[in-house]
Amino acid sequence: MIEATIDITIRNAVGDAVDFVIPIVELMGAAVIVLGVAIAFTTYVLSELRVRPVAYEHVRLLLGRFLAVGLEFQLASDILGTAVSPTFNEIGILGAIAGIRTALNYFLAREIEKAQEMEKKGMLMMPGGKME
Amino acid sequence: MTDSWLPQDVLGIASVIPFAIGAVIIVVGVLSAPRRGLHTARAFSTFLGLGLEFLLAAGLIRLASQNTFQMLGIAAAIIAARRIVIIGLGYGARAEG
């Protein structure tokens, strides 16, 4: 009886702790994306002003990497959610969201690879219209 | 899943900024392309790709605050649009040699 009570108390404590951590992880993901937007936009503006010209694909790649990291954080929060979700219905919803997010991450990674290939072949466009 | 204590207003405002940046990049980029001597079709896909990246960032920030299937659908649609633009960019580059 006492053991069962301790078990339930521990489960509740862990559940509460995970419920508290999930939004923090989601907020971290959003913060990474916001930081990426700020850095990519600064790079774009400096490039357009010819202060530090870079190819447009460089800016895309830069932001794409931040988006991939931010998406990983959001996926982590979904995984944490599955650890405490008590019903099959909630686990099903979380699983679907995690699946779609994983697909988004996969396509993002492929696009980054593709852009890197284009960068190697010198097929990137610079602000003046020249090819890098 | 949507009843999180995340600051919804802050994330909502944070998602508007990349959305506006993306829209401005697409409009300004495409309108200024002929003046700058850029090939219009190539410039269109380049700026559209860059602008869509910022729009995707806006979608992902909104996804953190509103964890719904609708938001996931929007993010997935932007990814699909970007994919089409990148395929178009590849064809355009090959056509130009």
Image (cartoon, coloured by chain):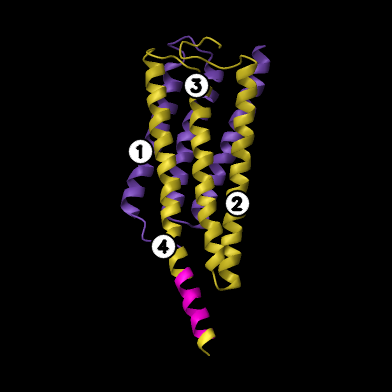
**Chain containing the residue with disc 3:** A
- Amino acid carrying label 3: it is Tyr
Question: Is residue A127 magenta-colored?
Answer: no
Helix, strand, or loop for circle 1? helix
Query: On the image, numbered disc 1 is attached to which residue?
Result: B17
Three-letter amino acid code at disc 2? Ile
Q: Amino acid at mark 1?
A: Ile
* Disc 4 to disc 3, C-alpha distance: 40 Å
Cα–Cα gap, marks 2 and 4: 24 Å
User: Any idea which chain is the purple one in this picture?
Assistant: B
Mark 3, residue position: A56
**Residue marked by disc 2:** A100
Q: Are marks 4 and 1 in contact (CB under 8 Å)?
A: no
Q: Which residues are magenta?
A: A4-14
Please check whether the numbered discs 4 and 3 fall on a single chain: yes
Instruction: Identify the chain drawn in yellow.
Output: A
Q: Are marks 1 and 3 in contact (CB under 8 Å)?
A: no
